[in-house]
Image (cartoon, helix red, strand yellow):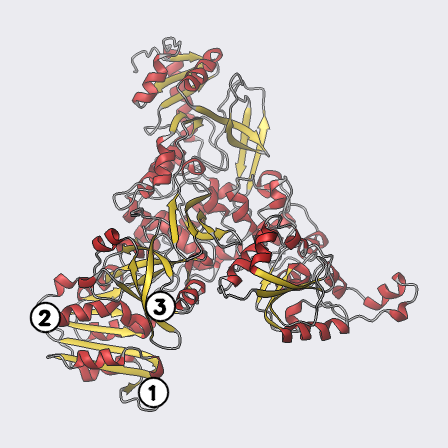
Amino acid sequence: MSATKAKVAVHKFSSCDGCQLAFLNMGEDLLALFDQVDIIHFAEAGPLNREASVDISFVEGSLSTPEDIHRIKKIREKSRYVTTIGACATAGGLQALRNVAQQDDWIQSVYATPQYISSLDQVMPIHEQIAVDFELRGCPVNTRQITAVLRSLLNGVTPVNEQDKVCMECKRQHEVCAMVARGLPCMGPVTRAGCGALCPGVGRDCYGCYGSAENANTASLGGRFHLLRLNQNQVRHRFVSFNGADPVFASAGSMGTGKND
Amino acid sequence: MHSPLRNFLPRNNFSELLTALSDGGYRCLAPKVCDGAIVYKELPSQDTLSTGISIHQAPGSYRVEITDSARNFGWSNGPQGLKPLVFKSRETLWSVRRDTNGQMTFTESAAEPDPVAIIGVRSCDLAALALQDKHFLNNHNRDSHYQTRRASLFLVAVNCTHPSDTCFCASTGDGPTAQDGFDLLLDELDDGFVIRAGTEAGEKILETLPVDPVAPEQAEAISRQNQRARECQTRRLPSRNLEQALFENLEHPRWRTVAQRCLSCANCTSVCPTCFCYSEQDTGTLDFTRSEHVREWDSCFTQGHSYIHGLTIRADTKLRYRQWLTHKLGSWHSQYGRSGCVGCGRCISWCPVGIDITEEVTAIVSAET
Amino acid sequence: MNTSAHCPAEAQIIAREQDSRTIVSLTVRLTDPAYANEFEFQPGQFNMLYLYGVGEIPISISSDPASSDTLTHTIRAVGRVSHGLARLEVGDRIGLRGPFGRGWPLQDARAKSVIVITGGLGCAPVVPVIDYVINRRSEYGRLIIMQGVKHSDDLIWRERYEAWGKHPDTQVLLAADMGGKQWNGVVGPVTELFDQAHLPTENSVAFLCGPEPMIRACVKRLTEEGLAPDRIWISMERNMQCALGQCGHCQYGDKFICKDGPVFSYAGIRHLFGVKGF
């Protein structure tokens, strides 16, 4: 660690702010964090200095407006290391669902004065506009993940890319498989770990909020969902929800379930 | 045929066994239905065993049915054998403190002895435990965490009378009846249990139990039900050593077709009672004064398993599935003197897409193609 | 003193050599004098080096076994841990456990000619072998050292190669796939050196370490020249986490690289060597 403290910024784009809570939920570790770093900009927590040069920028949210693109490029220029956090920043988030709909129709039907709406045709994850050094997935990301990234970066090493399947965490916690024992259409076998198998831990099937794991066989899993009596549309909805711009899930969602149909 | 044994424990005296174990200092873990499957759960004293559990297993499917049978052990197995009790899915190996001068102090963590009796152990799982013993307690290295937990186990096995459709222990020679590796072994009849000891510790418990002589009809009934349990198994592994056959078929087209179905999700290796892979990593506090070195279950179905400095040796599922199968049924023979499969069938039931190891290996080592 | 198989002991960096832009040699001493005193290793064995708060990696020991109170490890910064280790300075502390694995069969090589073929950083694990043979020069036959690198700028330890080449009956041959200015070695793969070497195939052994495609090409040449598979020794590399033959990552057919190797006779691994996925 260097003698001077690392400067950190937390930026927000189109998002629900939930990922930023992973910092605020650190509890006592927040005190340790303040010993290690100077928080320069973090609107949700107080400090405001969005133009400052920093060592690490955490970016939450996806790009939805022309102004967003301008702002994210500025952030890149001012940051040595950019980490995106959460499904919105890494894979579009829920708002990327509008990428598969007719945007104008929606704007006309939702807003009383649609002429004031200025938005991009497509919602984009951050890496589509700037080079991102590390992507942390999750909806939302949790404190354990944020702490691990900070520890790595402050140690001067690359953070660990957790890319195994949720099933690994699920089995380490000795949850009974919801798909095998109860026939639920669980997304665990294609979804990236990191959440600690939260949903299976409370008896629910995983709904894929951490995005695709490495080497995800969506065609085979989609085929299995059909055997569990999900129709084509229901299978699509399993894949395209929180990570609409995740290329693996998006393609599974748009192609139906692949060659086994 | 058999000389009459004075070892029949009537069903309504079964609680005496639990009391004896408890008096002997053991916590008792007993089978219970939880979240739709059989799991070993702590049995509070005075509590009784579950009855009438029936298990239906098929590729990718596991269902519990509760019947009015008075039997306690009329089922095959649950998602886990004994592995989680001896080889923890996650545990700290050591921790390190660092002071302001950068000086480090390493402290090894140790497993706490925790005498625990498992009621209703299956012969397949005893065979698997013997294999894990060979791996973790060999002459090259004895894993102290494993050893402490292993020494704490008291195993009450029950011969399996109701194998599932996914079971094939008869073909691997590991069941359905147990030959050794237990402290006590039960045969369950409608009105009670024939019980015998396999170790001195088991003998000590057995001496305290109010047992009756075994009637010849009871002995015959046991022999019949054991035979039925053997004969009802339809799945089987080729019983010969497959090491050579598998390594001669590394380019078999079947590896590619199974990879199209395989999710590489590692459910098979997680439920396999003999799979032993683990990864190690550091986790620590943000103030950088302390770090813990943790190991947790890993799998040859992950990318990280074969990663070395920028190169992934097994990037795709075909190579990962082949690594698993050629080891489990092939090179395991060279390393541990037998196959790594005990026929429990868990990898078939708990595979979300129902891949059947017996079907795959038969296709790969059979003469055609 | 800490003797547990899983748990490292503390070591301090007493010398640091920047061998190239990405390669660093760290010489360390175990901080417990008693442990440092009893530490012994064989050429070809490796240690697990621990970077505080980050993790462990296997690194072979490249110093002289005769002076094992200090241990040199040559590290290329390619991954998380190696990048971090490569940035450490003299005085910094690390964790160390070892030595692990089976090294080079130097006893079997006695009275024979020794052919050492290395590629890239593969030279590091074989340095103690070369030093060992040179220190006992009369007990061995010819010593032929062949080293290949991708680019001539990647070649480390030029002075060492020069010094080794001055010993009697010792031949040093260098090749670079791409040669820069002032490169007077061969331009091309290390197999190009075979014609110059006039390899003794009678009563000789070969020790190989480096990238596997290079080793495969060299093994092919060596067997073509008549060297028996059980005279060819290869140092293998796979993911290793426990170094005790238990975590399963270095599983290689019927072997664990960490405990049955990392040095194997080609005869023992030829059925899998070069097969994709193992």
Cβ–Cβ below 8 Å for labels 1 and 2?
no
Q: Residues within 10 Å of mark 2 (few under 14, many from 20)?
A: some
| Residue B72 appears in the picture as rendered | yes
Mark 3 element type: strand
Instruction: Locate residue C67, reporting x and y percent.
Output: 19, 63
Q: Residue at image x 43%, y 16%? A: B17
The mark tally for this picture is 3
Q: Horizontally, is B326 left or right of B189 in the view?
A: left
| Residue A192 appears in the picture as rendered | no
Q: Amino acid at mark 2?
A: Tyr
Residue wearing tag 1: C179
Residue wearing tag 2: C140
**N-term-proximal mark, 1 vs 2:** 2
Q: Chain of mark 1?
A: C
Would you place residue A197 above or below residue C104 in this image?
Answer: above
Instruction: Locate residue C212, reporting x and y percent.
Output: 33, 69
Would you place residue C188 above or below residue A244 in this image?
Answer: below
Marks 3/2: CA distance? 30 Å
Q: Amino acid at mark 3?
A: Ile
Disc 3 with disc 2 on a shared chain: yes
Q: Residues within 10 Å of mark 1 (few under 14, many from 20)?
A: some
Would you place residue B34 above or below residue A11 in this image?
Answer: above
Marks 3/1: CA distance? 23 Å
Cβ–Cβ below 8 Å for labels 3 and 2?
no
- Front residue of B250/B351: it is B351
**N-term-proximal mark, 3 vs 1:** 3
Q: Residues within 10 Å of mark 3 (few under 14, many from 20)?
A: many
Residue wearing tag 3: C75
Quarter containing the C terminus of chain A: bottom right
Disc 1 with disc 2 on a shared chain: yes
